[in-house]
Image (cartoon, helix red, strand yellow):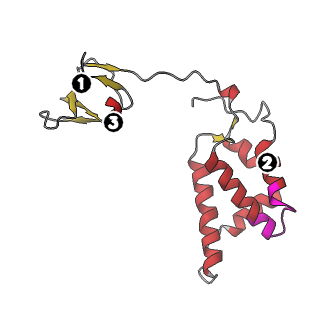
Amino acid sequence: MRVAVIGKDNRVENLILAGELSNENWVQIPDDSPVQAGHSYDKESGEFLAPEVQHESVQEKRIITKKAFLMRWTDDEAIAIDLASIHDPAADAQSQERSAYLRRQKEIQSQATYIDLDDKDTQRGVFGAMQLLEAMGKVAEHKARFDEFINAPVQPEERYTGPL
C-alpha cells in the first residue's frame, strides 16, 4: 500500500510503500489520490490537501538563465576564475582552499536550473569571486563590480522563462 509519512505541521514529508501501518505518523493514501510530499493532511477529515500555489510571476523576480549569468562576467574575469579553480597539489593550503571554493561555486551554478540574482547564496558566491578577482588585479574594486554585476537590470534576453 502507498503510505504518506506525516511530519511537523501535518505535512507529507515522504511517500513509501509498506505492508502495514506500523508507525503512528503513517497514513494510507487512497489509490486514486495524487498525494505528494508537501501536501498537508487533515486528521479530522482524513483528507490530503495540495499546497497553495504561489502565483508570483518570473517577471517580478530577478531570475536569469545560466548563460546570462555567465555572460555577466567579462572574459578576463571568467578566465581568471577558471584558472584559479584548477587544483594544484603543490600550492599552499590557502590557494588550495580558494581553488576548492571556486570549483564548488562553479558546480553549484552548473547544477542550477536558473540563477536568482536576489538569492543570498548567489550573492555570496559572486561577492567571494569578486574579492578574489580584486586580489588578482582583475577588478579595481570588488564591491563596485559586485554591485554592477548583481544589480544590473535584467534584460529581456537574460530572463529565465521556464518553471520555477
Secondary element type, mark 2: helix
Q: Is residue 164 magenta?
A: no
Secondary element type, mark 3: helix
Which mark identifies residue 149?
Answer: 2
Q: Nearer the viewer, residue 101 or 88?
A: 101
Measure how far apart labels 3 and 1 are at the Cα level: 18 Å
Where is residue 31? Give x, y as percent: 23, 20
Where is residue 91? Give x, y as percent: 64, 81
Q: Earlier in the sequence, mark 1 or mark 2?
A: 1
Amino acid type at mark 2: Phe
Q: Circle 3 is placed at which residue position?
A: 8
Measure how far apart labels 2 and 3 are at the Cα level: 40 Å
Q: Nearer the viewer, residue 74 or 152?
A: 152
Residue 86: quadrant of the picture = bottom right
Magenta highlight range: 132-143
> Please, is residue 32 above or below residue 68 in the view?
above
Is residue 120 found left or right of 49 in the rendered image? right
Residue neighbourhood size for the residue with mark 2, other residues' Cα within 10 Å, grouped as few (<14), some (14–19), many (≥20): some
Where is residue 125? Give x, y as percent: 66, 55
Residue 124: quadrant of the picture = bottom right
Residue neighbourhood size for the residue with mark 1, other residues' Cα within 10 Å, grouped as few (<14), some (14–19), many (≥20): some
- Name the residue rendered at 72%, 33% in the picture: 159
Q: Is residue 140 magenta?
A: yes
Which mark identifies residue 142?
Answer: none
Secondary element type, mark 1: loop
